[in-house]
Amino acid sequence: MIDAEANFGAPVEWLQYLLDHFLRRGALAEASRRSEFEAFTFNHSLSGAVAMYRADTGELSLIGVEDGHVFQSIVVAGEDTSRI
C-alpha cells in the first residue's frame, strides 16, 4: 500500500530513470550484462498520462510518456509556498 502522505520527490525524473535504466531496449542494465538481469527482456514500452495533484501547493499537472520521453504539463499552477 502506498502512503498517501509520502513524498515521491521528482516523479518525472524518477520515471525517466526507470525507462533509461531498466525498461527500454538498450537500457543501461541490459548493457551491464549482470546476471540479475539475465531473464529480463528490456523491451518494454510506456505510453499514456497520469494526473498528479500536489496538496501542498494546489498544483495540478499531467505526467506523460511519449516515445520514451517523460514530460510534465502544468494544468493549474500552484502557489509558491516557499514564503509562507
Image: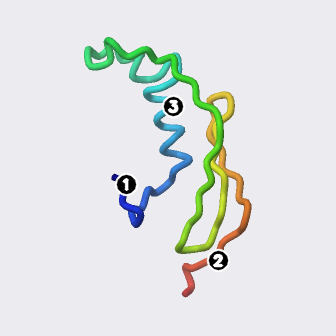
Q: Give the CA separation, mark 2 to mark 3.
A: 31 Å
- Distance from disc 1 to disc 2, alpha carbons, whole Å, reads 26 Å
Q: Label 3 near label 1: C-beta < 8 Å?
A: no
Q: What's the amino acid at mark 2? A: Glu
Q: Residue 2 carries which label?
A: 1
Q: In which quarter of the image is residue 2?
A: bottom left
Work out whether mark 1 precedes mark 2 in sequence or the reverse, and give the earlier one: 1
Find residue 69 and report its horizontal and vertical position in percent.
Answer: 64, 35
The residue labelled by disc 3 is: 19
Q: How crowded is mark 3: few (under 14 residues within 10 Å), some or many (20 or more)?
A: many
Name the residue located 51 percent from the left edge and 31 percent from the top edge. 19
Residue plotted at (68% across, 33% down): 66
Residue behind mark 2? 79
Toward the right, the furthest residue is 75
The x and y percentages for residue 26 are 50, 17
Q: In which quarter of the image is residue 53?
A: bottom right
- The amino acid type found where label 3 is placed reads Leu
Q: How far apart in space, not on screen, are marks 1 and 3 (Cα)?
A: 21 Å
Residue 63: assigned label: none
Tag 2: Cα neighbours inside 10 Å, few (<14), some, or many (≥20)? few
Q: 50 and 40: which one is in front?
A: 50
Q: Which residue is drawn at 54% across and 38% down?
A: 16
Query: Nearer the viewer's eye, disc 1 or disc 3?
Result: 1
Look at label 1 and name its amino acid. Answer: Ile
Q: Residue furthest front?
A: 1
Image label count: 3
Which one is closest to the eye, mark 1 or mark 2?
1
Label 1: how many residues lie within 10 Å, few (<14), some (14-19) or many (20+)? few
Residue at (66, 52) in percent of width and height: 62
At numbered mark 1, what does the secondary structure look like: helix, strand or loop?
Answer: loop
Q: Say whether residue 33 is left or right of residue 58.
A: left
